[in-house]
Amino acid sequence: MKKDETPDSMLIRALQKRILELEKENERLSKLATTDSLTGLSNRECIKEKRMHTLKDLSIILIDLDKFKPINDTYGHAVGDELLVWFGELLRKHIRPRADTIVRWGGDEFIIILHGAGKKKAEEIAANIMHDLTQNYFDTDDTSLLVEASFGVASSNGDIFTDFESLLKEADKEMYKHKERKGEVR
């Protein structure tokens, strides 16, 4: 005990220290709960937070890696995991880090949430990612793989979409159209 410190002030100081420790732990756990452990990208839980915000000026790009299962089956799940990490890094090159969010939606599906970007900008970003995929092969120990993906873009436009799910459904519909044009089976 310090000379000028009372038992009450010691208790208050100890409680303040403990509160800070708990706040840091809560922050760590929250980040852990909203982060995909493999890629370090946001996960589905992160979307729940995004749903609370307005859909005004919001666009999403839904991305599905084509022929991912055969890659996993041929080269193994470790290579498949490496490919997912590689793809996440490739996506990071195409977003504004403080404004946009990349989400590993599940398996080989990703969502890019673009705040303050219209459909034209989202389509431009999707086209840039597609181009980037044609220029950058995923290298494994044994081979280089050309990774392909299908994209669906949707954008909030006034009152057309009232919730995130309807916006996502539109992006999914557009992605399916993209797969059909490419002759991919969903």
Image (cartoon, grey):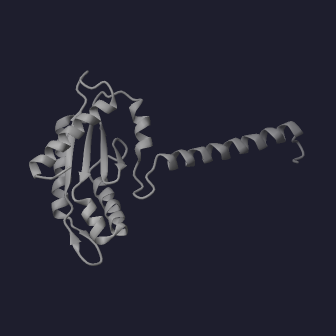
* Residue drawn where x is 29% and y is 48% of the image: 95
Horizontal placement of 111 versus 7: left or right?
left
* Residue drawn where x is 27% and y is 32% of the image: 167
Horizontal placement of 179 versus 31: left or right?
left
Total numbered circles? 0
Tell me residue 88's x, y (percent): 33, 56
Tell me residue 1's x, y (percent): 88, 48
Relative to the observer, which residue lies in front, 23 or 35? 35
Horizontal placement of 17 versus 183: left or right?
right
Horizontal placement of 50 versus 137: left or right?
right
In the image, farthest residue toward the top: 159
| Residue 166 seen from this side | yes
In the image, farthest residue toward the bottom: 142
* Residue drawn where x is 19% and y is 58% of the image: 148
Relative to the observer, which residue lies in front, 146 or 6? 146
Relative to the observer, which residue lies in front, 3 or 110? 110
Image quadrant in which you'd find residue 177: top left
Image quadrant in which you'd find residue 57: top left
* Residue drawn where x is 37% and y is 44% of the image: 98
Q: Is residue 140 above or below residue 112?
A: below
| Residue 116 seen from this side | no
Relative to the observer, which residue lies in front, 30 or 185? 185
Tell me residue 163's x, y (percent): 33, 27
Tell me residue 18's x, y (percent): 72, 44
